[in-house]
Each structure stands twice: as structure tokens, then as C-alpha cells.
């Protein structure tokens, strides 16, 4: 039983798309959907109902909670958080879902829907969502809280990267080319592949970077590179998917070129043979 004709029609269209052609009737401004093929197509009803909750009601609920409870009035922000939650449910954010604890979404919804389908009478759809799926929405709420934290951290990160890009854009270039060998340790080389000492790097670092942003600016790599502000950075690493490397790519953009350490060793050998 639906109190909204819009919801009733949407539900009917969704089930029709799954090959379940049923009808609903109006009674005292309430709209009653009848599972007319329940005896022969119970599994299909179950599957379609689960899909409807996952694809329609879950995001609708999240969107409402974001707006009413968390006060995210900007639609774009809500959509970005919804995207994170969707990725968590698809298993694409295991580092986030592990924080909330895994749960079997299909099993929880299936149990509630089976109770509904087995009930011999009329059930309010709103009451079904509110009470029979209460446990399910508690899990969704946990996912949502973690997704909001992740979104805020991503926003902070983007602001951090933007700030450092602006710093880099305004900073005078100290050396045209810098080579960075990033293996077990980090070694800087100048344009002629001469190793730069710690003292030399220390002298080049702009102290404002570390005093203004001590938590975010890496003093071993990011601070020296930003302070030198080279036109080109040749970075040699075996693993360019590391978070620090991705941050350097985001800051230096087209100024940064990545090669393997083997490329550096070959280049270094070539330089040593041609003094």
C-alpha cells in the first residue's frame, strides 16, 4: 500500500521492466499494488524488489539524510558523497568498507522482503521501509558517515594540492631540471646528474612551507621540490601508484615525468662515460 501515487507508479514501472506485469488500485487516496503472479514468480518478485531498494530507495534515503540531517544543501556535493557510498557497496572502496564492517546487503533485504511476500494481507510500503528495513538502513548509515568523512578529506586534499600549485606557479625557479631517484631512499640530482647533498637541499627549502603546513608538506621530497620549483622533474620509481607519487603528479602536473630506476642507472652511466 502506497500513500504516494508517484511512488506506486515508479514501483510498478520498475517491476514491469523486470517482466512482472501487475496492477494497482486506488482506495481512499491510497494505492494498493497486488502481487498477482506471486505463486509462480516469487523468486522474480524477490529479485526485483531487492534491486528496487538498492537502486532507488537507498540513494533516495541517503540523499534525504544528507540534506536534512547533515545539511548538505549543494546537490553536487550530495552526488559526490553518493558516488563514494555506491563505490563502497560495489566493493570498490575496501579500505572504507573495512572501517564500517562488512555486511551481506542482499541477505538483509531478502529476509525483509520474504516476510513481506509471505504476509497474507496489506502492508504499508512506508512502514515496511521504516521498520522491516531498519537494520539495513543502520548499515547504510554507517557507510554514509564514513563516506562523508572521506569526502571531507578529499576536499581538504584538493584544497591542499591547489594551494601548492599556486605556490609553485609563483615560486621563482632555482634549478631548471631536477632528477629524483625514489627507491629505498630518496636522492636528488641536479641537471648534470650530480648528487645534491642534504645540506644543499636544506639551504634551498623555503621555511614557510614547513612552518605554515607542517603536517601536510613532506619535508623529504615535496618541500625541496616546491622550493626549487624546477621546470622539469624526472622521477625514477618502480611504483608510481604510491600516494606520495600521485600527490607529486597532482602538484607538478606536466612538469613531472616518471621513469623506472633502470632508466636512471642507464642515464647515469651514459653521463659518466661522457664527462
Image (spheres, rainbow, N blue to C red):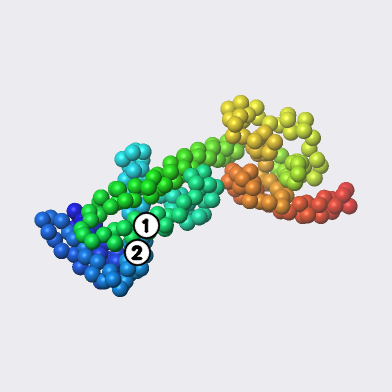
- On the image, the x and y values in percent for residue 123 come to 23, 56
Q: Is residue 25 visible?
A: yes
Q: Where does label 2 land, which residue?
A: 46
Q: Earlier along the polypeptide chain: callout 2 or callout 1?
A: 2
Please, is residue 180 above or below residue 22 in the view?
A: above
Mark 1: few/some/many CA within 10 Å (<14, 14-19, 20+): few
**Where, by quadrant of the figure, is residue 35 drawn?**
bottom left
Where does residue 103 sit, x and y in percent of width and height? 46, 51
Q: Report the side of 28 relative to 176 (left or right).
A: left
Q: Which of the two discs, 2 and 1, sits closer to the camera?
A: 1
Check the image and report above or below for 104 versus 144: below
Indicate the position of residue 157 as horizontal and vertical percent values. 53, 40
In the picture provided, is 109 more to the left or to the right than 101?
A: left
C-alpha gap between disc 2 and disc 1: 10 Å
Which of the pair 155/27 is nearer the observer?
27
Relative height, residue 203 to residue 182 (above, below): above
Which part of the image, by quadrant, shows the N terminus?
Answer: bottom left
Query: What residue is at 23 percent from the left and 61 percent from the top?
Result: 120
Q: Position of residue 61 (x, y in %)?
A: 33, 49
Q: Residues within 10 Å of mark 2 (few under 14, many from 20)?
A: many
Which of 258 and 21 lies nearest the eye of the viewer? Answer: 21
Q: How many dots with numbers?
A: 2
Q: Relative to residue 51, is residue 197 depicted above or below?
A: above
Disc number at residue 111? 1
Does residue 228 show up?
A: no
Amino acid at each position: 500500500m502506497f500513500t504516494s501515487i508517484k511512488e506506486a507508479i515508479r514501483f510498478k514501472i520498475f517491476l514491469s521492466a523486470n517482466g512482472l506485469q501487475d496492477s494497482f488500485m486506488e482506495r481512499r487516496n491510497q494505492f494498493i499494488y497486488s502481487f498477482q503472479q506471486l505463486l509462480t514468480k516469487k523468486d522474480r518478485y524477490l529479485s526485483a524488489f531487492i534491486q528496487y531498494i538498492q537502486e532507488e530507495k537507498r540513494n533516495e534515503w541517503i540523499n534525504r539524510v544528507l540534506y536534512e540531517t547533515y545539511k548538505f544543501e549543494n546537490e553536487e556535493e550530495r552526488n559526490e558523497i553518493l558516488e563514494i557510498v555506491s563505490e563502497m557497496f560495489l566493493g570498490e572502496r575496501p579500505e572504507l568498507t573495512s572501517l564500517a564492517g562488512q555486511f551481506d546487503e542482499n541477505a538483509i533485504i531478502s529476509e525483509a522482503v520474504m516476510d513481506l511476500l509471505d504476509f497474507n494481507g496489506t502492508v504499508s510500503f512506508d512502514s515496511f521501509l521504516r521498520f522491516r528495513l531498519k537494520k539495513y538502513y543502520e548499515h547504510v548509515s554507517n557507510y554514509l558517515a564514513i563516506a562523508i568523512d572521506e569526502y571531507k578529506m578529499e576536499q581538504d586534499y584538493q584544497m591542499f594540492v591547489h594551494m601548492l600549485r599556486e605556490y609553485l606557479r609563483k615560486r621563482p625557479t632555482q634549478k631548471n631540471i631536477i632528477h629524483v631517484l625514489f627507491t629505498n631512499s630518496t636522492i636528488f640530482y641536479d641537471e648534470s646528474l650530480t648528487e645534491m647533498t642534504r645540506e644543499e637541499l636544506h639551504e634551498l627549502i623555503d621555511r614557510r612551507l614547513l612552518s605554515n603546513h607542517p603536517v601536510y608538506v613532506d619535508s623529504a621530497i615535496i618541500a625541496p621540490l616546491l622550493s626549487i620549483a624546477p621546470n622539469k622533474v624526472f622521477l625514477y620509481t618502480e611504483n608510481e601508484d604510491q600516494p606520495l607519487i600521485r600527490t607529486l603528479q597532482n602538484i607538478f602536473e606536466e612538469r613531472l615525468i616518471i621513469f623506472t630506476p633502470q632508466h636512471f642507472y642507464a642515464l647515469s652511466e651514459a653521463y659518466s662515460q661522457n664527462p
